[in-house]
Amino acid sequence: MHITVAHISPILSLIAGVLILIMPRLLNLIVAIFLIVNGAIGLGILKWLHL
């Protein structure tokens, strides 16, 4: 299976959702990291992912 940009967002969402269910205090941190990573992927800054 080849992981593309289209697969990264749902995978991150699942991981973030599970972490929020386990530790609700992490909500702000998880949302911030999620938004930063999605923005970096969308702008092409994270080229090391070979997408």
Image (tube, grey):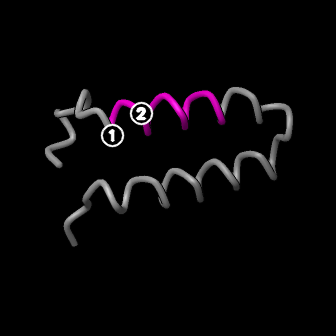
Binning the other alpha carbons within 10 Å of mark 1 as few (below 14), some (14 to 19) or many (20 upward) gives few
Task: Identify the mark at residue 39; answer none if there is no mark.
Answer: 2
Image position of 32 (left or right of 25): left
Image position of 17 (left or right of 46): right
Residue at the spot 81% in from the left edge and 52% down from the top edge: 21
Is residue 16 positioned above or below 3 on the image?
Answer: above
Task: Tell me where residue 49 appears, x and y as whole percent.
Answer: 21, 41
Q: Tell me the quarter of the image containing the N terminus.
A: bottom left
- Report the front residue among 21 and 6: 6
| Residue contact at pointers 2 and 1, CB within 8 angstroms | yes
Binning the other alpha carbons within 10 Å of mark 2 as few (below 14), some (14 to 19) or many (20 upward) gives few
Amino acid at dot 2: Gly
- Report the front residue among 23 and 46: 46
**Stretch in magenta:** 31-41
Count how many numbered circles sit on residues in the image: 2
Farthest residue, direction right: 24
Is residue 9 positioned above or below 39 on the image?
Answer: below
Image position of 9 (left or right of 35): left
Task: Tell me where residue 31 appears, x and y as whole percent.
Answer: 65, 35
Residue position marked by numbered label 1 in the rendering: 42
- Report the front residue among 9 and 1: 9
Residue at the spot 17% in from the left edge and 33% down from the top edge: 48
